[in-house]
Amino acid sequence: MKDPTDAPETNLTIGADGARASDPGPQPGERFVEVYLRPGFAADKVDIAWSGRNREWFHEGFYHCLPLQLANQVGWCVLCPEDFSVIWNGRPDPSSLTVGGCRSIISYFGHGIFTYTPPFVFRTPPGINLLVKAVPNLPKDGVCPLEGFIEMDNLKGSFTFNFRITRPAECISYKKGEPLAQILPYPRGWIETFEPRVLVDGPRYDEHMKEVLRMEELRRTNIEHNEPGVKQRDWRYFRGEHLDGARFPSHQKKLALRGFVSPQKDGIAGPELVEELRRVVSKTERGERAYGPGQTLMPAPAARPAETYEKVQTDE
């Protein structure tokens, strides 16, 4: 399977100057996730990548579980800009947390929370929120990403990625390129359209539970007839196949998210944005706040390629 980051340029774009001059703006029904680089930052790449299906800690058996594989692939990872370490002494004040190695990571809220302000802001189409969450099936000992649900068609600014340390007095380290959090576009109000129901009888109940019980009996039979040390697996769900052999028409075994692509321009942001950067630096040197909370402009790290975190294996 082709790496999704090699896909041709689409409406998932990154641009230091926002939309192109000929771009009329979002169209009704258009689907995109846009990234706007802050002034003064290198515009050729951005630290966001499709998360892929693989996880380093998975052994072969995990790849037989299709729900795990698909969950891994839903969304894009925001990657760590450079190596850093944090340690928290357990107190609630912001000064109780020490950060080393990355100036983009700060202690702002206290209570063992460290904050990453990326050098970009997001935009989504009308009616689409951005769900910010932990990277699926990629636990990190001692730290928990805080999740958020943001109206990025409404917010004219940035948000921060925040992480709560769960174990005081222990050093938590990240490596450059390591996934920090996952982003996922999500239609606003969609989940509210669902009606929760509980069925205990009736024709629909009887028909569905008949199939459920048949499948459970088949699995029990497979387990009972297994040879010692040999696991007999039922691959019907993996193949999208029912007990009668019928195929589920919209079955998915893999996702193919498109990658964020670079704008067709050289160097960094244009003169007007560089002037804005100078204004920010000047105010910072005078001890003034250049932006509101959660909008601090951090010094630009060197440009890095936004590579796919995990390569896709091509099983069919």
Image (cartoon, rainbow, N blue to C red):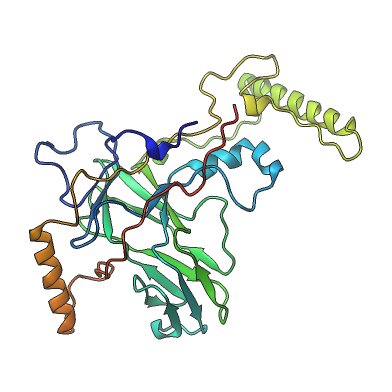
Q: Is residue 1 left or right of residue 157?
A: right
In the depicted structure, whether residue 205 falls above or below residue 112: above
Task: Give the number of marks.
Answer: 0
What residue is drawn where x is 47% and y is 76%? 112
Among the 4 quarters of the image, the one containing residue 132: bottom left
Judge left or right: residue 125 versus residue 3. left
Where the C terminus falls, by quadrant? top right
Question: Residue sitting at 8 percent across and 59 percent down?
Answer: 271
Left or right: 287 in relation to 246: left
Residue 289 falls in image quadrant: bottom left
Name the spot of residue 236 as percent of width and height, x first: 68, 24
- Residue farthest along the front direction in this orientation: 266
Determine the residue positioned at 74% across, 26% down.
215
User: In the image, residue 48 lies at what x, y percent?
Assistant: 38, 51
What percent of the width, then of the height, locates residue 88?
Answer: 50, 80
Q: Tell me residue 251's x, y (percent).
A: 54, 25
Pick the front one: 63 or 160: 63
Q: Is residue 130 above or below residue 28?
A: below
Left or right: 233 in relation to 58: right
